[in-house]
Amino acid sequence: MRRGVFAVLILMAGLMAGCSDRTELDDSTLITITGMDLADNGKLAVTGMVLDFNEESPSQEILLSSTGKTLRENRSLLSSKIGGEFLSGKLQIVIVSKRLLKAERLLPHLDVAYRDPKISNSALIVACDCSVNKLMDTKRSSQPILTEYIRKLIETGHASEITVRSTMQHFHYMETEEGITSSISEIKPVGKELAVVGTMLLGSDGKYAAHLSKEESMLLLLLKKQFTSPASFTTSIQDENHNKANVSLDINKAKVKVKTGYEEGNFVFRIHLPVVAEVVELEGDFRVGADKNQIEALLKEKLEEACRALIAKLQMNRVDPIGYGLHARAFDYGHWKEVRSDWGKAFAEADVKVSVTVAIDSFGVME
């Protein structure tokens, strides 16, 4: 009997302790988006999108701005502008302007966020080629919660293979891993809506290096072995008899093979990309059944050309978002160690060749 009473008392004490530090939602303000930009005076300009659950608040979403030396200082400034307790544990998106990325490395600015155990490392990092305040203040034709709107844009864009998906945790890995350079999603206002426009690449110094279009982003994901669903590839083909056609493919399977070597002072990469695809559109002079082998050969040339152009662009900008530095380190650590401090430069000087094979498994239900 005494044991039963004692157990009940312990349970009640635990429940009371759990309620003692509770937060009243009506008295709280959640910051769900943090936008970071470079102010004209060189300081860090921060725009925060907060959800206000106070019944007296005229709007559920409130846009706040401040300028300070660090993200921590700006967070204190934003907190002073709102009523109620300021909670950062629900942060879902970090938006960074191209202007800031061209001037400074992003990782040090996020130091306070990585040290805060309440902030989830699953928050997405997104770049924009415009003012962060302008992007977050875009008057959309429909009015969904901006946080969910942007998150769905990125998730859908990544599922459609038109952009990467970088969480805070993965961004920290890319920034601290010497064998790869960072890549993050890029969005911008288009009319009264926001749109995914591709991928932004950062160099070994953590600063802006280049932009990839949606088509280039699809190839990047293929070569990164992050291909998860049918990816669309559209091109024009022409044979020696001047037969022409516009072709759209759904790439259903892709398996990348990388051979690594070291010759004459540079790393060597031989990349083979076999793909299995379905033709979803064929406008032109080719006959589907009779010309299948020829269509495959022409598509192989086009896909190889696109992949080689992407690799050339990466090398020109001294970036390696695919991670060939990881292959180099595993293959020849001795030579890797000599160039690890500036792998972007070493990759730019590497001998990289890409070969592609295309197998068409279907021309659709009406062949």
Image (cartoon, rainbow, N blue to C red):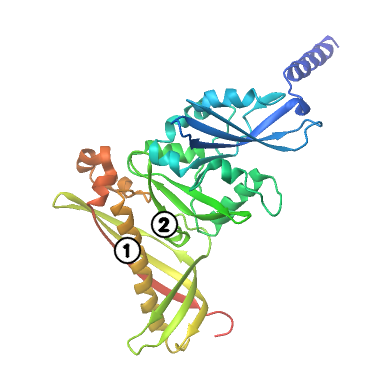
Q: Residue 356 occupies which quadrant of the picture?
A: bottom left
Q: Residue furthest top?
A: 2
Q: Residue 19 occupies which quadrant of the picture?
A: top right
Q: Residues within 10 Å of mark 2 (few under 14, many from 20)?
A: many
Q: Relative to 10, is 331 above or below?
A: below
Q: Residues within 10 Å of mark 1 (few under 14, many from 20)?
A: some
Horizontal arrangement in the rendering, residue 263 relative to residue 259 (left or right): left
Q: Residue furthest right?
A: 1
Horizontal arrangement in the rendering, residue 254 relative to residue 159 (left or right): left
Residue drawn at point x = 64 percent, y = 43 percent:
147
The x and y percentages for residue 119 are 58, 31
Q: Which residue is mark 1?
A: 308
The x and y percentages for residue 336 are 23, 42
The x and y percentages for residue 333 are 24, 41
In this view, the residue in front, 298 or 203, is 203
The x and y percentages for residue 210 are 38, 50
Q: Quadrant of the C terminus?
A: bottom right
Question: Marks 1 and 2: CB-CB under 8 Å?
Answer: no
Residue drawn at point x = 23 percent, y = 41 percent:
339
Q: Which residue is mark 2?
A: 220
Amino acid type, mark 1: Arg
Residue drawn at point x = 53 percent, y = 23 percent:
73
In this view, the residue in front, 36 or 157, is 36
Look at the image and tell me whether residue 116 can be seen. no
Amino acid type, mark 2: Leu
In this view, the residue in front, 306 or 360, is 306
In the structure shown, which secondary structural element does the residue marked by tag 1 occupy? helix
Alpha-carbon span between mark 1 and mark 2:
11 Å
